[in-house]
């Protein structure tokens, strides 16, 4: 069966520090991968998605970047965090080519920037 | 914005009652999905209804879709305290990535 792992679960970082959130998927090949951010009391905002290694699409301009160094690994990064980067970050995957769009989410990473 | 909008934003009911949540969207869709999120956790897919379907059931869940009104409803029958969570609708407008647009969610509280 497929599983998705996301870490760290919680993170408290000072403004201006770097960020690295990691996500890996097991039990499937060539998935679509996604990073979402969820602000308090709001819906999910799609930040990045990837259809293959090295292929990253950005949905919104921001202080963050994403990379996909391996087929089932997706990394969210920042060189210098802002206060506004605080939030709940969710990694998700979907089946490549199945355009139903059904998503399978990780457990999330709560980032607090102080 | 193509974002779906759930209604109500918050709903509080007693165990055993039914809970109904609504979702409206703005343009044509391929399908509409409902997700559940327990506090501080990731989202879990509940049910998908395609644009050519009008009703779908899964256990205690019943989803309806009215494409003429661009709206959907999620009914949870005989609710339980364990149903307490936020529920999100997500619309799929197509495209090779099948990207979903999520609403802001309905926060459901079921009191024992």
Image: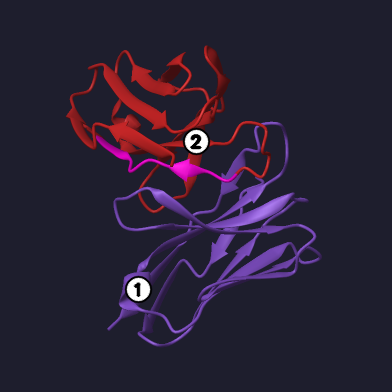
Quadrant in which residue A20 is drawn: top left
Residue at 48% across / 19% down in the picture?
Answer: A71
**Residue range of the region highlighted in magenta in the rendering:** A102-111
Image colour for chain A is: red
Q: Residue at x 47, y 49 (%)?
A: A43
User: In terms of image quadrants, where is residue A79?
Assistant: top left
Q: Where in the figure is residue A70, as x and y percent of width and height?
A: 44, 15
Q: Is residue A32 above or below residue A88?
A: above
Vertically, is A25 above or below A70?
below
Q: How many marks?
A: 2
Please state which of residues B61 and B92 is positioned toward the viewer in this rendering.
B61
Crowd tier of the residue under label 1, counting other residues whose Cα lies within 10 Å: few below 14, some 14–19, many 20 or above: many
Where's residue A112, x and y in %? 23, 35
Label 1's element?
A: strand
Q: Which residue is mark 2?
A: A93
Residue at image x 41%, y 80%?
A: B79
Q: Position of residue A67 (x, y in %)?
A: 44, 16
Quarter the C terminus of chain A occupies = top left
């Amino acid at each position: 069966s497929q599983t998705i792992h996301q870490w760290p679960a919680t993170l408290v970082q000072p403004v201006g520090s770097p960020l690295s959130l990691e996500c890996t998927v097991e039990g499937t090949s060539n998935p679509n991968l996604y990073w979402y951010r969820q602000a308090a009391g709001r819906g999910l905002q799609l930040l990045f998605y990837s259809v293959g290694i090295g292929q990253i699409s950005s949905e919104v301009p921001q202080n963050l970047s994403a990379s996909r160094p391996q087929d089932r690994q997706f990394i969210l990064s920042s060189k210098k965090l802002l206060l506004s980067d605080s939030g709940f970050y969710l990694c998700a995957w979907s089946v490549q080519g199945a355009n139903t769009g059904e998503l399978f989410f990780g457990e999330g990473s709560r980032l607090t920037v102080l | 914005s193509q974002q779906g909008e759930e209604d109500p934003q918050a709903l509080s009911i007693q165990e055993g009652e039914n809970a109904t949540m609504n979702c409206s969207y703005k343009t044509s869709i391929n399908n509409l999905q409902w997700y559940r999120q327990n506090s501080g956790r990731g989202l879990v897919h509940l049910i998908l209804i395609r644009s050519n379907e009008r009703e779908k059931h899964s256990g205690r869940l019943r989803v309806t879709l009215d494409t003429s009104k661009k709206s959907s409803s999620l009914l949870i029958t005989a609710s339980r305290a364990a149903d307490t969570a936020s529920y999100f609708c997500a619309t799929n407008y197509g495209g090779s990535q099948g990207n979903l647009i999520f609403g802001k969610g309905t926060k459901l509280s079921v009191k024992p």
